[in-house]
Amino acid sequence: MMLMRRRLACCSREREISIDFDEQDRMITYDGLETCIINNQSYEEESGTSRGDGCLTDSLDDDAFSSCSSSKDASSSFSSKWLPTKNDEHSCDDSSLSGRSKHFDAKKKPGYVYCHMDVEAMKEKFSKLLLGEDVTGGCKGVQVALALSNAVTHLANSIFGELWKLEPLCEEKKQKWRREMDWLLSPTNYMIELVPSKQNDANGRSLEIMTPKARADIHMNLPALQKLDSMLIETLDSMVNTEFWYSETGSRAEGTNKSTSESKRWWLPSPQVPKPGLSNSARKKLLDKGKVVYQVFKATKAINENVLLEMPVPAIIKEAIPKSGKNSLGDELYRMLAAESATVDEILTSLKIRTEHTALETVNKLEAAVFAWKEKITDQASNGKSPVRTPWSFTKDPSSEIGRNEPLLNRAEALRYQIKYKYPNLPHSFLDATKIQYGKDIGHAVLEAYSRTLASLAFRILSRMGEILKEDSLSNPNSPAPPSCFPSSRDLYRTPERPLLSSRVRHSLTDDMNKADGTETGLEFLFADAKISSVNTTPSRSSRLWCLSKPRFVRPSPSSSSSGAGEPNSSNLYVANCGPAVGLSHDAIAAVFAAFGEVKGVYAADESGVRVIVSFSDPFSAKSALEALVGRPCSDLDGRTLHIRYSVLQLSSQVNDCVPVFLADSELNIPGLFLLPDFVSSEEEQQLLAAVDSKPWIGLAKRRVQHYGYEFCYGTRNVDTKKHLGELPAFVSPILERISLFPNLDCDPESLNLDQLTVNEYPSGVGLSPHIDTHSAFEDCIFSLSLAGPCIMEFRRYSVSTWKVASTTDDDKSDHPTCIKKALYLPPRSMLLLSGEARYAWNHYIPHHKIDKVKDKVIRRSPRRVSFTFRKVRDHPCRCKYPQYCDSQQQR
Ligand SMILES: O=C(O)CCC(=O)C(=O)O
Ligand SMILES: [Fe+2]
């Protein structure tokens, strides 16, 4: 039976676009979106700024990939390709799919120009996609669903990551977005579900048979998303001949010398409006467009939330979430929720949530508690312990645990909803992030990623609009305040009086941390701007894409117990001293552990390649494996002695898999940190390398070193001032001279009489554990010259820290709950200066990776990096402003 269709018509001059909703689905209007689509279209017509891009309708014959010629085909524009009209019915070759929706015709012509290069690009894209995150082709490939999700995210970042201005997207980017989204969405063309349908056989008898149909969620959401996508691009395209414009303020030289928080982002274009403000019609036009974008934002968020609701909580996470809702909430939040006299609004007020980070933390706790309670109810229902008809409609017994938890559960859900409403651009919660991370359903993955990236884009456009409206209201006091739907009108815009949210929060955080260690602070999520993967491509001014952080199982703290420490009853084991880096594949490890029970998976515990998590389906198997294997050489694993503990799940807020890698020092916002690229020429680099290679190296466990001036003792992380090895060698004299001209030097000139040099030679994949160079050992300024190869240097600020010497192999401090991380790319021949806060309060660290991701590129470490670290040995105690990290001040 043909479903009645209702057409939502959106006509532009050149073509007809329609969204067909099934009659039964009439209520799916995405919060007034229909009206907006219609208004938007009529507005476009009226303003004459409709996307009349005939070129986008070019198409090419299916088999003519190698040709760049194109033929006009007005019916196959990007939107209409996905939003066919009733007449647009092609029958599919595959007769088994003949009942499929007409929306999903894989043979339809693309709405963009194909050329030979695209085929190569497509091959590259799909190869990377299939390789997952591991370009070595090794064993770290990710699930297809996650790979597709990441690919959509990366594509969106590469196209919209730099959206600092409201202006049309350049044609090249537009084409790339359309073309590559088309590739990435293509698997949905083949997704079907079987639905029962009635048919008459030859004798006229009615039979019920299963017939294939386009998958309902894809069928419903994808065309809508594509329409929303077109609307956002059209909004950008319409930003021509505007009354506002952008000034590219400042130059690099100016910017680096300014110290105000405002100048920190001097390189970003700043919106300008005419002196008397925008004209009424221009303001109205912008507001109207803003309303449309806001509707798109709400619609894409709604789709995203619905898809996430459909996605199951992964088994591995289910198990790791505390079984007690009360424990997940913590005492304070539990008490608040349990106090029935307080309304949810009042609880929200008394929570005093001030940062997105705290909001996210609270959402995470609430979701974990809700999950635990729901699981309990489901369990009891299935065990027949309660007179339950369905998990959600049971007869309440107020004295039973379920009865007690139900009001709490409802209030927790209401509170979660309120927080999400108040912070519409919150990153994904921990549970949602894990659903994406471990999801296997490709349809869900594609819908989730597409809706998420569109919501982010909409939010960015709204932010840019808000900035302009803000400028307008500053220029013209009579202009109305921008409506609240513009994020930047509330708290995200930049004005002289109100610096950027991120830098403001950053500074206050840093101040807080200086004042008192151990206080709860808003941390990494605040800074995880504009990127979902582990690399940040661009600094974000006022909006960001959501940041996913992977759930991570970590080694429990050594204090948790002695043998078999960690969380007894856990089904997950943290196993050290085996892994791909020592030639033991996850499969081989799984095979060994499978002797003790069902192994659900073996996962990398970190990036070392020698620590894994073995996840059993039950805690008894984990226990037997631990008892049998711990501390003993294992013949099936090359005789290696396994160090095993129960593993604990680390919640998202404690983990940052999104350490942004920046290319410029100013982007890290760490006072006292400076990087000068090309400090030496290639010739000088070769000469320096030849000079050290002609001297003897001292072999450490993983790298080689040379010391000049004074020997550095790794046991005490200090120098023996009585053992002077002589002047620094002549081959570094030109470098020392140049260092004295280093800009931004704001330190005691005495500390520039550099007299100690450590040369480090790192083979590929070797890094350096997090440390602060001992305060009492060296003066304020530390210079490090990178030669022969690049590296990523990560900076970590722990809120609770002591001056104590960290174990040189232990980098697990990163699991510390309150740690801010940033990373900087150090190119060869660059000079890094650590001074002030960067030198005294931040740990620096070189991750032990063979491959680093910088921007969208994967960079393989060169076989060798040699660094020259110049320091001045201190002859008096340190009196820095950071006593909590200072050994001199701790001893006094
Ligand atoms: O290799 C580098 O650039 C840093 C070396 C370092 O931090 C140190 O030797 O303390
Ligand atoms: Fe150092």
Image (cartoon, rainbow, N blue to C red):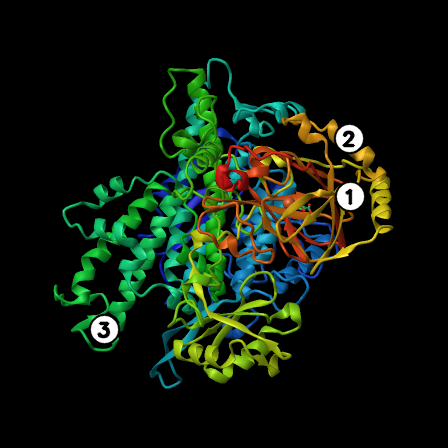
Q: Amino acid at mark 1?
A: Leu
Q: Residue at x 63, y 74 (%)?
A: 584
Other-residue count near label 1 (Cα within 10 Å), few / some / many at <14 / 14–19 / ≥20: some
Residue ID for mark 2: 738
SS assignment at label 2:
helix
Q: Which quadrant of the structure image shows residue 322?
A: bottom left
When the figure is inspected, residue 119 is found, relative to residue 278, above or below; the finding is: below
Front residue of 225 and 690: 690
Other-residue count near label 3 (Cα within 10 Å), few / some / many at <14 / 14–19 / ≥20: some
Pick the quarter of the image with the N terminus.
bottom left
Disc 2 and disc 1: Cα gap in Å? 23 Å
Residue ID for mark 1: 725
Decide if ligand 1 comes within 8 Å of the CB at mark 1: no
Residue 381 tag number:
3
Q: Amino acid at mark 3?
A: Ala
SS assignment at label 1:
loop
When the figure is inspected, residue 85 is found, relative to residue 823, above or below; the finding is: below
Q: Earlier in the sequence, mark 2 or mark 3?
A: 3
Residue extending farthest to the front is 722
The x, y position of residue 304, in whole percent, is 41, 53
